[in-house]
Amino acid sequence: MKIRTERSTLLFNIVGYVVISILSLLCLLPFWLIISGSFSSEAEIVRDGFKIFPSEFTFSAYQSVFSNPQQIFKAYLVSISLTAVGTLLGLFFISMAGYVLSRKDFKYRNSLAFFIYFTTLFSGGMIPWYILIVKYLDWKDSYLALLVPMMIGAWNIILMKNFMKSIPESIVESAKIDGAGEFTIYSKLVLPLSTPGLATIGLFLGLAYWNDWFSANIFITTEAKYPLQFLLYKILASAAVLKTSVAANLSADFKPPTESLKMAVAIVVTGPIIFLYPFLQRYFVKGLTIGAVKG
Amino acid sequence: MKQGLTKMLSVFLMVSFMTGILAACGGGSGDDAATKAAAPKTESGKPDISKKVELNWYLVGDADKDSPQVIEKWNQMLAKDLNTTVKLNFMTWNDWQTKYNLLFASGEKIDMVFASSWSDFFKLSKQGAFLDLKDLLPTYAPETWKTVPEQDWKDVTVQGKILAVPSTYPEYTPDGIVYRDDWRQELNLPEIKDLDTMEQYYEGVKNGKKITPINGKAWNEVNTLFHYYNDFKNIGGDSGIIVAKSYDTPRDVVAYPFTDEFVTFVKRMKTWADKGFWTSSTLASQQEAGDFIKAGTGAAYWRNAPGASGFIMDVKKTNPNIKLAYFPFTHFHNYVVPNLGINNGMAIPKSAANPERSLMVLEKLRNDPEYYNLMTYGIKGRNYDFTEDGSIVSPAPGQDPAKVKGYGIASWGWRNIKNEHPAKDRWEGEAKLIEEFKAISKPDIFAPILMDYQPVKSQLAAVNQVFQQYGQPLMMGLVPDVDAAIETYRNKLKTAGVDTVLDYVTKQVATYADEKGLK
Amino acid sequence: MSGFIAELRKNKILFLMIAPVLVFFVVFSYFPMVGVYYAFTNYNFDGGLFGSPFVGMQNFKFLYESGALFSLTKNTVLYNLAFIFIGNLLQIVCAIFLSELTGKWFKKTTQSIMFLPFFISFVLVGAFVFNLFNTETGVINALLKQLGMHTYDFYMNTEPWKYIIVFFNVWKGLGYGTVIYLAAIMSISDEYHEAAKIDGANIFHRIRYITIPMLVPTFILLILLSLGGILKGQFDLFYQIIGSNGMLYETTDIIDTYVYRSLAVNFDIGMGTAAGLYQSFFGFVLIMSVNWIIKKTREDYALF
């Protein structure tokens, strides 16, 4: 009996390691090519495409990215602050709403879930959105335009609700009998039991804030307020426009290498956020959850 | 399901409730500016500048690293001369068209914005985005009013209203190709003069250098060649497949896929494609043909004339061993049309709070060399300096080129030939080319035709789609059977409603031609 | 109504806790939703949203009159179904392996690596695809040549592109989706597994009878969430991979790319909004019906 179990575990492990290794390789290889490309010369990329190792090693793409290091530093600061503040606030509101919706004894939970989900179906498009932010909220060129609109998303709330649904109702019930208020149950009991969910949604929120360049593109006009992503996309866009006929008369000396620049930008952007994930990973380790608390 | 319906109903009720609020707040912004336009003017006829105002301006493109300094200096001058300051906003190049359109929709108070035929000036004009400057110009911008040529004012007059101040910078921007003259000489190929010599050049470099002549995306190279070679003229901007058959027959409007010229041309392009003048994946490539010239694996690149000289100068710096030449497609029919004035210009949106003062600033900017040089070339002695003959050196001699660069923003909107200075480093062929163009210049009778596609917009959308799906591969010679592909293309166009669009455009052009007394 | 007030009184705190989110959606989603009205007007700046002339269904014409609407709808739906199902299944497989494998270092590293494609912009994905598949310098054709085989002209053949597109979409979302399932697995109580082990269940049994059933609600939820957007295509993915390559449209054209091409030269707010409204409405009807059916059969799994 014991031997059979071991054999199946062995088989599972062999298959598992092989599958995961292959998939990881498929994910790693392109990224490696990008790293290699970011250190290649422009002509080499145009001529030969992607290569495992560049034949002429150059920093020129990174020089273009960091041509104004102070600005990049500032942009990092803006991005990190926005990501941190936005993720924390967002998690708070989302988890609260998720908790309310997960309560089976809450009569309007389905209507409200519908009310929330409906927003993912229909949208009025960019113009009313822009008018709302600029004219009614007066958030043009304000960090609020980058922070608030992204904070709460219907998908995240519903996912959160789903994670919280797996918390046994008995826990909530017994706390109620002990006289705990709703907010106390949420903050003292439900939140600690929802760490995998919180980590997941937190990760998604963080990624969304970190990757968002579009809000800054349409709402921010002061260069000092640019988040990192937008600053980098701006460099890319100018590099691209300088090639077109539109800019034929633009006498700027700024002629960056566009191809290697694209890749350097990808690397610079991914750098810091990739460290967020290992940090979160401890919340995806077994044993932290219900079983542990209950026992 | 009944419960679902009530829910839906309540949502829609709520939406319509809020709609009411939005409507109440949104209305009425249209008329403000019109009444304002006639406002302050002192009795002596001199503009009243006693009130200090801050203007809100928008330009397309990026700011320069030195822009903060330049703008500060500019504002000091403006405060002294006009009791005004300007907040100059830059629309970075990312999705600039989207941002540009949003500006007008939002109702944000904007006193001046870059405007041009290539940023939808005519369409936005039709939709009522800009303020009529007719009554303001003589008072607030008298010199501009006098010096801008009559024809240029006409070009920006839409439905009887003058809606922009065009730049005054006569320019020729015909298309053509930049090619490797060093290779041509080395391989003993004839100079490019026409389609046959062009083919000989491509074939020569293809075989002699073992490269793809138009590497990367070759669509522009072929499409512009097609129009110039056949003298098909776009009507009122990019008119897609509906063109005037030649300069001399403006009323003869055709859908070119139905012409014999088209058949002859695509058959020829099929042979070019088969010979490998471009790659079979050319339509998917995102790489400019010019990049391959720099990398040594390309031999031709589409550029308009000023773009060509820019590219040639650029390559001279990065690859000094490459020698390039330019073949303008104007050589096919031996004439060229100058750009419309409104190829670049400045306009005032209807939402402007201070249109009068804004015009006064523009007047200064266009006509006062001190203002013009500062905002166009940057800070003298730093970003630029003049040589004795008045050409410009940038950055200024003595500055460290690693730290100080020439100044560059999208200043095209106020460009004025009177105050322009040529760069000291120029492509030597440029002056000759301009002389050549001047000699064969004819007025542009097609670009000023105002096309409003509103009544046929759904047919036009369908036609544009068919063009991209079936027309582009055909013109690139990438289809296995040309005759069958032409047949399919034409049928699809018919289904899309090409005849309706053609009839409509033909009528519009006829009306225009009657008005202007064209034959 | 009185029932509502009683409920409000009873669950005052719960209502207060969800109120910020509701206000948020009213302001940032429902309020701007008035913009759907653009779909029924000929927009001009003098009139604005409500002053522009009403034109009824005219803006929808370009979608159905050309006759392409059916095949576009079909393409879009099929692609999205492939993305959703293949993507989710692969993510589940990865999540299960990652939760059961023992090598800590291996697990951590591979999880991070699987997230990398998420950061690669579609522009670069497009460049990769071009570098892999183009005829002259592409990696695959270079390999074929070296092996002495015939080269294959991918850009002249429509067939392979379906698979290429699905592959890259699944590849890009792999790490992201895996996290959701991983978190769901982590919420499963250890007790179940321990009990099963004592009963002598091997690892395959435990996965089959414990892990997978516990993942089903999450799986269904994610499918349901995606259904509403079944007609909204991933524009960037298709646009960057296929570009303006008309020969490949037959199998790779979706509504978003079609609308983009139709309006690229002569953009019209009304027509753009109309296309979006069609996509939304289709998704709305679909999700309402599916949710209704699920509610009848397994109420627990319903979205609302």
Image: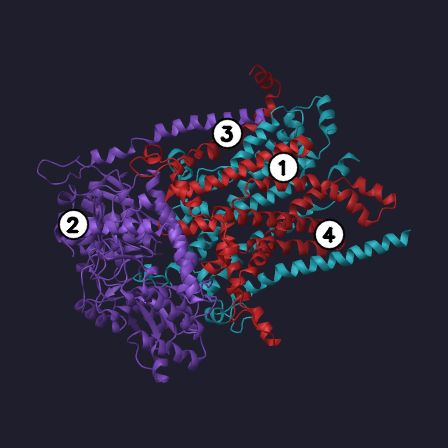
Chain colours: A cyan, B purple, C red
Q: The numbered mark 3 sits on a residue in which chain? A: C
Label 1 sits on what residue type? Met
The residue indicated by pointer 3 is C23
Q: The numbered mark 1 sits on a residue in which chain? A: A
Would you say the residues marked 2 and 1 are in contact, meaning their CB atoms lie under 8 Å apart? no
Classify residue B445 as left or right of residue A145.
left
Would you say the residues marked 2 and 4 are in contact, meaning their CB atoms lie under 8 Å apart? no
Which element is circle 1 on?
A: helix
Label 2 sits on what residue type? Glu
- Give the image quarter of residue B471: bottom left
Closer to the camera, C269 or B514?
B514
Which element is circle 2 on?
A: helix
Judge if badges 3 and 4 mark residues of a common chain. Answer: yes
Circle 1 crowding by C-alpha within 10 Å: few under 14, some 14–19, many from 20: many
The residue indicated by pointer 1 is A160
Judge if badges 2 and 3 mark residues of a common chain. Answer: no
Mark 3 or mark 4: whose residue is earlier in sequence: 3
Judge if badges 1 and 4 mark residues of a common chain. Answer: no
The residue indicated by pointer 2 is B515
Q: Is residue C199 shown above or below B272? A: above
Q: Is residue B515 visible?
A: yes
Label 3 sits on what residue type? Val
